[in-house]
Image (cartoon, helix red, strand yellow):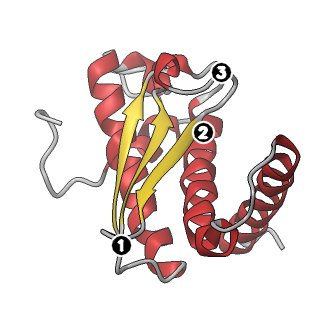
Amino acid sequence: MGQFPACFSSTVLLAFLIWPGIKPSYAQSEVTAIPSAERTLLVSSFANEKLAGWQKRLNLTDWDISVLVVRSTDLKPNTVGNIRWDREKKSAVIRVLDPADYKMKTEAMLRDIEFTVVHELIHLEISPVLSDLKRTDANRMEEEYAVNHMAEALLKLHRGLE
């Protein structure tokens, strides 16, 4: 991040930049006021912080999991993330959409990135159960539906919304 002290949390910086009513003279309230490369680094740091918390909550600490921020061209059409894992090595990479490809306000984008991290971790958690199933378009859609609902429920509980 170059200009910010190493101990300065990206979550705190992002919260400062999007907090209602705070309008610093040197930046707009949206993260889009920050140059694209720095915005990507901030989102990467944010996603990694969320990964650490959710990895612990979901008891996946024995896995080596990383997050990459990627452009939409690096993902399947109409997706905002994915996960690839190696069960033998217990390693995984979650890819989340770069902020340059989001068309929503910063707060909504950050919530979506956290949702994506949780969603992909749930795929990882249930992968042993589904690994022996014959994969079809129908059961993939059912899996996505179930994973979305689980991620939504966990995030609501975490955020105190239910």
Which quarter of the rendered picture does the C terminus lie within?
Answer: bottom right
Q: What is the C-alpha distance between the residues marked 3 and 1?
A: 28 Å
Q: Could you say which is closer to the camera, residue 144 or residue 20?
A: 144
In this rendering, is residue 139 above or below 99?
Answer: below
Marks 3 and 1 close (CB-CB < 8 Å): no
Give percent across and percent down for residue 50: 45, 60
In this rendering, is residue 21 above or below 100?
Answer: below
Residue plotted at (45% across, 72% down): 55
Which circle's residue, 2 or 1, is located before the other in the chain? 1
Question: Label 3 belongs to which residue?
Answer: 77
Q: Quadrant of residue 89?
A: bottom left
How would you rate the neighbour count of disc 3 (Cα within 10 Å): few for under 14, some for 14-19, many for 20 or more?
Answer: few
Q: Secondary structure at mark 1?
A: loop
Amino acid at circle 3? Pro
In the picture, the disc for residue 122 is none
Question: Label 1 belongs to which residue?
Answer: 63
Marks 2 and 1 close (CB-CB < 8 Å): no
